[in-house]
Each structure stands twice: as structure tokens, then as C-alpha cells.
Image: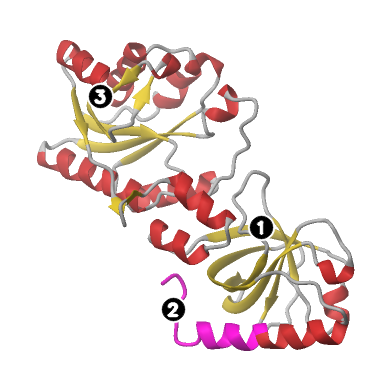
């Protein structure tokens, strides 16, 4: 079984408490749960660990599911480790794992990770057809000798902090709200590819980002952002949409990096979104568009001046 191969390299030196999930975004709600995991493990002299899936289980189970990941896998693992857990175990959610019974999943965690307990949220479930909800797992734990700790979810303004809520905020262009729930600014990273070259002709060269398929992308509009380029972070006015003034239909992500004239083609650039400035609009002339871009740049400078990157 593939999960055996993926868990076996860890084999911690002492018992552990673990949590299991996708943890897309590694948002404040996840941090709240993992903080309790670390606290409980430390009090018991055990290790704290996270078991996370490489992909969302729905990608396998639901043919209509289209992922919109908040964080790429490598960033998710980095952020999870940054929360202070002792280990992060990556497993592949394949067809075999999807049919595994909850009791067998627990047995794998006990054997490979010396897991003596789970720390989970109230909606957690594992095993075939989500048979292992917290009630079932608690009863199972009493028989098998492991603990199940249920942590109340983090709530803000009466709403539970969830990845779904963050994705909805991003899709609506409310990057400020998404950042508040994440506990850091929402960001996208992609490779700079050649575009039509129109921006350079107009004196506003833009970096056209090709982001990995399946990532959450903010709704169409103009945004103030920090662009992480090779020589450090720079202010940027980012445009997401179809460039209606030029009659185009293909959606793109472009960033006009302020005070930068280097060559970014082929490089990866990370855009850290701060605030949505306005809707994408169609202008009757190039001059009208250029005047609006000047306003966007001025507002971007005003918004970002005095603000720290990542804060």
C-alpha cells in the first residue's frame, strides 16, 4: 500500500499526537487547531505531527470538483512546519486510500507514526465514506487505546474560519478579507511569460504571470500588490481580467512593477495582494486607459508607502 511507503520514513523516536487533513491555505483556523495539538503533545512529552494529503480528496471522489488551491503544496508544507510541529507527513490520496476503513487508517498512524491520539475539529471524519466521524473515532479510541481531542473551530464575526470562506473572498476580489482570515497576505506565484508586448509599447511594461492550474485567482479587477522580484519586493499595480479595451477574451494576470526595468521573462514572481483598487473596465481610447493607469499607480504608491511587506 502506497501510504505505508509514504509514512514509514518518519518512524518517530517516541509517541506522537497527530492531526489529519488537507489544510489548504494554512489559515488562522488551522493555526488555532495546530496550536492546541502542539500544546497537548508538549504537555504529554510527545511529538506533534501533521498528516496532510498531496491533493484534495474531492479531486478523486467528485468528477465535477475543480480545485482552487489557496496555497501550492510546497508552500503548504513550509507553512505547516513554520507553525512549530515536529513533523509533517505527506500522503497521496489515491483510490486505495479512499476505500480504507477508519480503523485501518488509525492502525497505520499508530504503527508508522507511533500516534497515540488525534487532535481534530468537530466536523472531522476519516475512512471510507467518511465513516470515522468524531463520535465513531472516540468509541474506537476507547477500544484501541488512543485519545481523540476535539477542538472548537476558530470563529470570527460569527463565522467559522474555513478554506472555503477564503476561496470565496478571493474569487470576489476581496483580498483584504482573505488576508485577514489567512493571518498573512494572500499571494500568487507564477512564471513570467511573454504576452502581446502591448504594455511595453505603451510605456507600462507588465509581467504576465502563468500560475499553476487549479490555484485560486482573485476576481477580475485592479489590485495594489507587492511583487517579489529577484532584487527584492517592489510595489506593483496588478491587473486580472480579459483586457476589454483591446477586445481580448483570454483571462490573464499582469503586474506593472513600479520602479523596475529588469528582465523577468522565465522567472518566478510572487504577487502579494494588498487591496483591490477597482473593477476592470473598458475604455474608449488608449489615452483614457493610460490616464486611469496613472491614477492606479499613484493610488498603489499611496496605499503601499509605509506598509511592510507581508504585514
Do the CB atoms of the residues marked 2 and 1 lie less than 8 Å apart? no
Residue at mark 2: 308
Which type of secondary structure does the marked residue at label 1 adopt? strand
Q: Is residue 259 visible?
A: no
Quarter of the image for residue 179 reads bottom left
Question: Along the line of sight, which residue is nearer the eye, 208 or 171?
Answer: 171
Residue at mark 3: 114
Residue 82 lies in the magenta stretch: no
The magenta stretch is 296-311
In space, the residues marked 3 and 2 are separated at their CA atoms by 42 Å
Whichever of callouts 3 and 1 sits on the residue coming sooner in the sequence is: 3
Query: At which x and y percent is residue 217?
Result: 62, 55
Residue depicted at 19% across the width and 15% down the height: 139
Say left or right for 165 vs 14: right
Q: Is residue 289 visible?
A: yes
The relative height of residue 272 versus residue 219 in the rendered view (above or below) is below
Quarter of the image for residue 272 reads bottom right
Say left or right for 171 vs 75: right
Q: Nearer the viewer, mark 3 or mark 2?
A: 2
Question: Along the line of sight, which residue is nearer the eye, 88 or 55?
Answer: 55
Q: Which mark is residue 303?
A: none
Which type of secondary structure does the marked residue at label 3 adopt? loop
The relative height of residue 280 versus residue 251 in the rendered view (above or below) is below
Whichever of callouts 2 and 1 sits on the residue coming sooner in the sequence is: 1
Whichever of callouts 3 and 2 sits on the residue coming sooner in the sequence is: 3
In space, the residues marked 2 and 1 are separated at their CA atoms by 22 Å
Which type of secondary structure does the marked residue at label 2 adopt? loop
Residue at mark 1: 190
Query: At which x and y percent is residue 232?
Result: 56, 76
Say left or right for 165 vs 45: right
Question: Along the line of sight, which residue is nearer the eye, 190 or 246?
Answer: 246
Amino acid at each position: 500500500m502506497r501510504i505505508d511507503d509514504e509514512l514509514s520514513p518518519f518512524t518517530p523516536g517516541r509517541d506522537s499526537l497527530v492531526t489529519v487533513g488537507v489544510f489548504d491555505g494554512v489559515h488562522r483556523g488551522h493555526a488555532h487547531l495546530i496550536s492546541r495539538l502542539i500544546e497537548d503533545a508538549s504537555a504529554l512529552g510527545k511529538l506533534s505531527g501533521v498528516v496532510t494529503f498531496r491533493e484534495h480528496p474531492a479531486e478523486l471522489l467528485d468528477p465535477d470538483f475543480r480545485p482552487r488551491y489557496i496555497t501550492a503544496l510546497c508552500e503548504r508544507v513550509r507553512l505547516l512546519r513554520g507553525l512549530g510541529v515536529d513533523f509533517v507527513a505527506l500522503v497521496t490520496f489515491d483510490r486505495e486510500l479512499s476505500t480504507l476503513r477508519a480503523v485501518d487508517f488509525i492502525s497505520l498512524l499508530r504503527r508508522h507514526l507511533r500516534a497515540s491520539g488525534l487532535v481534530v475539529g468537530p466536523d472531522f471524519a476519516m475512512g471510507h465514506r467518511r465513516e470515522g466521524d468524531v463520535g465513531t473515532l472516540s468509541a474506537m479510541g476507547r477500544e484501541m487505546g488512543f485519545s481523540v481531542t476535539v477542538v472548537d473551530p476558530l470563529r470570527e464575526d460569527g463565522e467559522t474560519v474555513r478554506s472555503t470562506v477564503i476561496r470565496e473572498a478571493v474569487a470576489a476580489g476581496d483580498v483584504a478579507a482573505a488576508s485577514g482570515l489567512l493571518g498573512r497576505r494572500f499571494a500568487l506565484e507564477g512564471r513570467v511569460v511573454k504576452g502581446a508586448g502591448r504594455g511595453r509599447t505603451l510605456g507600462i511594461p507588465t509581467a504576465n504571470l502563468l500560475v499553476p492550474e487549479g490555484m485560486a485567482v482573485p476576481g477580475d479587477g485592479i489590485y495594489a500588490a507587492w511583487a517579489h522580484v529577484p532584487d527584492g519586493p517592489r510595489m506593483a499595480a496588478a491587473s486580472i481580467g480579459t483586457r476589454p479595451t483591446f477586445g481580448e477574451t483570454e483571462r490573464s494576470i499582469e503586474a506593472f512593477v513600479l520602479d523596475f526595468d529588469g528582465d523577468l521573462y522565465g522567472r518566478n514572481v510572487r504577487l502579494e495582494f494588498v487591496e483591490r483598487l477597482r473593477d476592470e473596465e473598458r475604455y474608449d481610447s488608449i489615452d483614457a486607459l493610460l490616464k486611469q493607469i496613472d491614477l492606479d499607480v499613484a493610488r498603489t504608491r499611496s496605499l503601499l508607502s509605509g506598509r511592510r511587506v507581508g504585514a
